Image: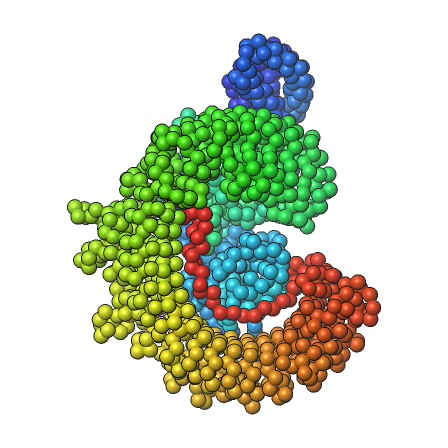
Amino acid sequence: MAEVGVAFLSAILGVVFDKMVSPEVVDFMQGRKLTEGLLRKLKTAVLSVNVVLEDAEEKQLTKPFVRDWIDELKDTLYEAEDILDEIATKALRRKLDAEFQTTAGKVRNSVSVFLNPFIHRLEPKIQEVLDRLEHLAKQKDFMGLQVGVLGGKQYPERLSDSFVRESDTFGRDEEKKKVIDLLLSSDASGNEMCVIAIVGMGGIGKTTLAQLVYNDSSVEQHFNLKIWFCVSEEFVVLNVMKSIIDQSATSSAGDTKGPENLRERLQKNLNGKKFLLVLDDVWSEKPIHHEFLGQLLQYGAQGSKILVTTRNESVALAMHAIPPHYLNHLPNNDCWSLFEKHAFRDGSSNADPKIKEIGTQIVKKCKGLPLAIKAIGDLLWSESNVERWTNILKSNLWDLPMEGTNILPALMLSYKYLPSYLKRCFAYCSIFPKDHIFEKDQLVLLWMAEGFLQQSKIETMEDVGKRYFDALVSRSIFQQTSRVTNSGFVMHDLVNDLANFVTGQFGVTHLVGDSSNEIGKRTRYLLFSGILNNFRIEEDLFKAKQLRTFLALGLVRKIKMPRTILCLRVLSLIGQEITKLPDSICKMKYLRYLDVSGATFNRLPNSICNLCNLQTLKLAGCWNLDRLPRDMWKLINLRHLQIDQTSKIKEMPIKMGKLNYLQTLSKFVVSKHDSGSSIVELGKLNLRGKLLIENLQNIRSTKYALEILKGKAYLEELELKWNAPIGISESQSGVLQNLQPHQNLKSLSFRNYCGRSFPNWIGGLTSLSKLALIDCNYCSALPPLGQLSLLNQLLIGGLDGVVTMGPEFSGNISNSSMRPFGRLKILILANISNWENWVHLGEENEVETFSQLKGLYIQKCPKLRGRLPVYLPSLDKLVISDCEHLESLSIDSFPVLTSMKIIRCDNLEFVALAKQDEHDGLLSKLKILLIDDCKKCELPMHQQFSSLEVLFLKDCCDSLTSFPLDLFPNLKSFQIEGCRNLQSLEQHGGDLVISKIGIWRCPNFVSFPKGGLRAPNLALFSLKNCEILRLMPDKMHLLLPSLRYLKLVNCPEVESFPEEGLPSNMKKIKILTFKKLIANPWMETLSRIEWLKIGDYELEDHVESFPGELLLPTTLTYLCIKSIGNLKSLDKEGFQHLTSLVQLDIIDCRKLRYMPEEGFPACLRFLEIRNCDRVLKEELKDKKGEEWLKVARVSNITIDGGYIQQDYEERWSGRYKYHDLKFELLFYDIKLKRSLYDLEFE
């Protein structure tokens, strides 16, 4: 195992040696004989150790005591590197001070003052390191190490697109089919825990199999929603919940606080959908996680499944999975096919029989593990030297046991032959937790800060880092995440284990609840994650005085960095409670990367400008920050400055143009005064990536804007923003004309521009793919955007001056074969208050216009009357809202339309089909149809809706008296609200596939289909404000076998349920305003109910005690008593038999004074009381009196939303709370954010 450690050591030796001969160090030490002599001896000592490392790689395999020698050598070399960095920093500081001083005399004085003490302090440090190295060199002789050749041949790099795709998998077709069959099959056994487990050893391909299944088209079609989450060693319920919320898309978890709100959003987002949740790499066997999975399945529709991958059979049993699917080793033929794919340039081994013979033996040593095969294949890719193949085959590393380390021999070999410049980059990744998602650009900045990237005359350091990253991807060190998350790269667990072994005690990952990794004096790289104790952090940090990287992720509490840590290169405190950065930060003179995003301070200390090595400074989300330090121009090595979401900054510091290396500047604020940098300074910077320029109205003369942006060929996204418009400004037209960007620009946004016309250079941006024109109120005509051949997304919003969109919008195409808007996919036209007509090119030309448009959104255009384009052959989604004067909508030329939403269009009478007889089947392709608040709109019942799955009708279709369900054979969700004349539902054919029905605010609705509603898949049935409805559907117990949730609100005439009772699978009931119903013994038929919400304001005349004569089901886990106005007490008899009750909510029972005499059953864990008797609430808050004694043993109690008693762990991970199942959220298709590249399309 020491071989791997020594390989890493050789990389450090190389770095130290390079720094000793660097020009900065050599020039600085020139003429200082004693120091020069020490450095020469140091170089000799380094070389003497260096020459024996190759021999050590072999001999140390059988001599475990060498590990200590290696660690001591690493530690010594780290200290040597620190000394050399100190010299280089002092040399740079000396050079800068000379430049900053105004007279040569001052320079000489300042140099003489600080140089001699520095040299005197430096020489003992060098001597100490030299003594340690010489001692280690002598020890190598006693260990019998021989001089050898270090390194050997490095293997060629592969292209970065060699990460695993579905086509790279072999031998898993049968397993894939078996798992898919389990996912798609109905649960005939009645087992509600529909959990399926894939079990197998590490590296055998469990995740790959799960991804193959996840991305299969049959699985895609079967489930309404798919979610992927990688659990890894710690199963954190909150993290799983947040991921599900974010991936289910109806709302984000980003701004949600507290577990209760998370659960509420979680249920809303799952919302009765049939979902597939993949939990990859699960280790937990805790029963509470099995309970959590059960809750998720209850939220979703019947048929929802959870797929778990794990190494341990015991995990599958703990999750109550059906008999697990065990994944075996790959068969020999498939092993060879996979190896060929990765090892040979053309995927075939036919070129050399000897190599094929050796390769066959190598594959056998991989023992059927796909990860090992890929790693060795990537190592040998395109290698034609037979001797090299033989060396791999005969390496002693194959014989090392995995016990105790979990390191695959194949991975050790892959690491051994990595180029030395990649070894430290790889090892650095060890501090990140397993399954961490790596973002390429971010990791490159960290590598750069640590000095891992070689300088290049033809590449930037960032480009070098990206090349290194791609090289690691090509060797399967990194693997791209599934296309679901599509957000970065991950390391396989076994690769992470290898990185941790390589780094050893020099890298520490400190996770919440994990005390196995201790911080010590040798720790150089440290990552904290989780809710940790503040004092323990500072105590631990005090030990690591030579720490180089400190990363705080997640919920780490407020941290005070010890002043003894001065060797930091990387300091990341994202989202921490930082109210002030101390002036002493300037003492961290090696610091190259500082991230304090989300901090609450309003100023940075000016001393930060003395950090002459600083390369990256991230201040995103520092909302209180109102200015940057005046002397930032002195940060001559600064390359990346991120100041997104810092709205209080009103100007940039002076002399910004002196930052010659600056590449990333997320925002530039034009100053109103002379105290900050003018726009001219921006022109001196060679920026890349994204740039926002704010307060452009402060540019005093058009000449200052000339040529500012035109030369920035690497700028990809540009947003130009003025303050809110206050009137027409001709000067802004001239400024904008001079702000012409380079033609390579890909995304452009204007906001609050007050000129009369757009600049003519827009048409020359041939690479532009995204464009947003927002609140440019005084522009009356649009530029010729149709001629932008690569334009993919277009947003036009708030252009009050536009009355007509004419042919000029498409551009001059008379002499061109180009199709106007030929690649446009998304078109958004919003808040154009005076737009009346969309004048088109004519039918013969429009066939070639908008040919690829998939989404058309027209919102808040109240004067629009004209028709839409004649022919949109690719349009899939159409949304029109708040267009009050739109009278007709012709959709006969939208042949593939599947989603249509019409909202608040008062004069629209629905669709017009130009040739009725030829287009009768047009609407048959629609899958989603929403009509909301369109008074004149009617649903054309003579049409075919054979594909419609979701139908929402609200405040429309007043002529509709009976709804024919048979016209919608594939309808899964139907909600009708505010249909004033609807009286009945009709069904004459066979069974429906529908799973949700909601009838709300239909005052004349009285009946269901005769003989009953035949809907075997119906899970959610909601009736609300149907005041004259008397009878529920017949034969519910037979015809609605899947019904799980019944909601009956304000239907006061309903007296009873069918005599035969309700379906046996019923789990949840909500009944509010039920004065007649409560008098009947319907509760006796609900023997399996788990969730009940009950209440009625009108009951206050006669209900003073609950449950009274009602016999509540013993299966209840959740009970909510709401709005019983005269309720005064809870019966002891009615609660003691509820032996499954977990949560009780009592809401708006303002006279409730007494709890049950004998308290609640022991199983109750959550009690919520809201808006009840004041005396009762005060007694419970004070935790005194008889009523408190009745409830004291309940572990979690809230009064009016605040906890008075809680079990912290149970509250955060075990809450068993239910919320109402709801219908799909169909309204919010577009979230208009800061600019076009922040748009989210749902």
**Nearer to us in this view, 979 or 612:** 979
**Nearer to us in this view, 39 or 978:** 978
Quadrant location, the C terminus: bottom left
- Give the colour scheme shown: rainbow
Residue 1105: give x, y in percent of width and height.
Answer: 72, 80
Q: Quadrant of residue 1125?
A: bottom right
Residue 115: give x, y in percent of width and height.
Answer: 62, 14
In the displayed structure, does residue 476 sit left or right of residue 1208? left
Residue at (45, 89) in percent of width and height: 1011
Residue 1066 sits above or below residue 469 on the image: below
In the orientation shown, which residue stands out farthest toward the right? Answer: 1185
Residue at (37, 38) in percent of width and height: 732
Residue 765: give x, y in percent of width and height.
Answer: 31, 40
In the orientation shown, which residue stands out farthest toward the left? Answer: 815
Residue at (21, 55) in percent of width and height: 841
Residue 523 sits above or below residue 1091 on the image: above
Q: Is residue 369 visible?
A: yes
Quadrant location, the N terminus: top right
In the orientation shown, which residue stands out farthest toward the front? Answer: 727
Q: In which quarter of the image is residue 1056?
A: bottom right
**Nearer to us in this view, 75 or 532:** 532
Residue at (62, 53) in percent of width and height: 234
In the displayed structure, does residue 1200 sit left or right of residue 1158? left
Residue 1003: give x, y in percent of width and height.
Answer: 48, 81
Residue 1171 sits above or below residue 545 on the image: below
In the displayed structure, does residue 813 sit left or right of residue 1117? left
Q: Is residue 177 visible?
A: no
Residue 1213 sits above or below residue 909 on the image: above
